Amino acid sequence: MKVKFAKKYGFCFGVKRAIRIAERNQHATTFGPLIHNSREIERLQKDFDVCLSSNLEEAQSFKNVIVRTHGITKDDLQALKEQHIHIVDATCPFVTKPQQIVEHMSKEGYRIIIFGDKNHPEVKGVASYGDDVTVIANIDELKHLTFKKKVALVSQTTKQPEEFGKIAAFLTARVDECRIFNTICSATFENQFAVDELSREVDIMIIVGGKNSSNTKQLFKIAQKYCTDSYLIEDENEIDNTWFIGKKLCGITAGASTPDWIISRVQAKIEQI
């Protein structure tokens, strides 16, 4: 089976930074999953004794706490500081940016609109920095809202730029003042554009990444638009040889939290088919 990779895929800047931070801070815990890839989290625990705390209470029992790439809420961060715990902040700078914007614009009296998944840890963290905050998953959810005269719009870093643009246009036509902050990560845009391009020319697409990863699920969704035989897998063990019957060219991409060692194993197995 021939394999062709997307022009952009895999670890983004923020994830690479977080992994380096975790490897330098052995015998610590992360507050929430450091990244959305269970296999890489298992490697960090095995090789560097970096364990996972799923909530504030667990994290408070450690002397050294690493804040995950997606960030945590303002209240949780303050609670850690008050206990004089050594905090190592691995929050991606692209996530810190909307946190700061929301805090500033909220103080200026703006209603905050966040385009994102309200249950995602990044969005929960960003929303915690504002007072009057509404999280929307799509443009249809805006149609039932009433607006203040001043609105500020930000986005979850992994959302699709096209949809963000539609939401921005909708708001600007309905409020006196709309401040728009494009907080979508550039790496996210590049990876999405690359999978859009590749999925148009291959017989089958394999997307490698955590199934709870927002950016990986977005890549899968885009691939399905042009290549109906698209599959989302976490590692090579989920590959089904029957997927490739009658296929000649397989496209591969990977989410921003997917390490190279997993991608290489997937490539090797597919090339043997």
Image: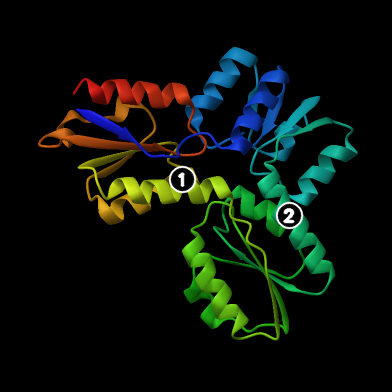
Which quadrant of the figure contains the C terminus?
A: top left
**Image-quadrant location for residue 149:** bottom right
State the residue at coordinates (59%, 20%).
Answer: 44
- Give the labeled residue for mark 1: 191
Say above or below: 141 vs 255.
below
- Give the labeled residue for mark 2: 99
Q: Residue furthest left?
A: 246
Residue placed most toward the observer, 89 or 132: 89
Identified by mark 2, the residue type is Gln
Locate residue 213 relative to residue 102 in the image: left or right: left
Structural crowding at the residue carrying mark 2, measured as other residues with C-alpha within 10 Å and reported as few (<14), some (14–19) or many (≥20): many
> What is the secondary structure assignment of the residue under circle 2?
helix
Q: Residue 251 appears at what percent x and percent y? A: 29, 38
Locate residue 234 relative to residue 229 in the image: left or right: right
Q: CA distance from mark 1 to mark 2?
A: 23 Å
Q: Earlier in the sequence, mark 1 or mark 2?
A: 2
